[in-house]
Image: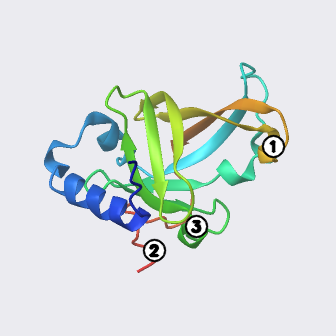
Amino acid sequence: MHHVLPSSAVALLLAATTASACPAAMAPQTVLASTAWQTTAVHEGDDRSTNVIDRYPDVVGLSVWDACSNRFEYFDPISGASRASLGGAGYYLFTGDGQHQVTLPDRGAPISRRLQTLDADEFTYSRTVPRNLQAGQPEVILHVVHTPYRGPLAIPMRPGSASR
């Protein structure tokens, strides 16, 4: 028999198992939590010459990540408003092989992303989505590039700080 835990139970389990591991946070969590990130480019397939960021506004924004709680939160890149109420907050983890990052939003379905680059200057992942994120369209592989945010908005460095 296959049992599915409610998302609140998964969240509590993740919080309990990751909060105590903070001093020993793995390198990916530490790098991801070191800065606020801004989406700076989106590429379809192997074409890195064309930035299609305007066609994928749902993947564009600012993000913060916490290595101690494994929480994340997304923010609007223009207003700086939290997207938590729209599913833009939750828990995250990295697979044991370090190849994928999985986000578990408080509202919405989990998303698995293949890590391409994660260092102090760049966080890039890829994932397969319908073209322009429209149901019924052919699937494409998106490469989403983030760089450290240096803009004027006051983005909190820890998820949940803005919504409290």
> Which numbered disc covers residue 132?
1
Please state the total of marks drawn on the protein image: 3
Nearer to me, 151 or 20 = 20
The answer to the question of whether label 3 and label 2 lie on touching residues, with beta carbons closer than 8 A, is: no
Tell me which residue sits at (35%, 47%) in the image: 34
CA separation in Å, label 3 and label 2: 10 Å
Mark 1: secondary structure: helix
Task: Say few, some or many: other residues with alpha carbon within 10 Å of mark 1 (under 14 / 14 to 19 / 20 or more).
Answer: some
Tell me which residue sits at (37%, 34%) in the image: 95
Task: Say few, some or many: other residues with alpha carbon within 10 Å of mark 2 (under 14 / 14 to 19 / 20 or more).
Answer: some
**36 displayed left or right of 69:** right
Task: Say few, some or many: other residues with alpha carbon within 10 Å of mark 3 (under 14 / 14 to 19 / 20 or more).
Answer: some
Name the residue at the front extreme.
1
- Image location of residue 31, percent across then percent down: 34, 39
In this view, 24 is above or below 18:
above
Q: Which residue is mark 3?
A: 83
Kindly identify the amino acid type of the residue bearing the numbered disc 1: Asn
**21 displayed left or right of 46:** left
- Image location of residue 49, percent across then percent down: 76, 22
Q: Earlier in the sequence, mark 3 or mark 2?
A: 3
In this view, 72 is above or below 31:
below
- Image location of residue 29, percent across then percent down: 32, 43
> Which numbered disc covers residue 162?
2
- Image location of residue 163, percent across then percent down: 46, 77
CA separation in Å, label 3 and label 1: 20 Å
Mark 2: secondary structure: loop
Tell me which residue sits at (37%, 44%) in the image: 93
Q: Quadrant of residue 40?
A: top right
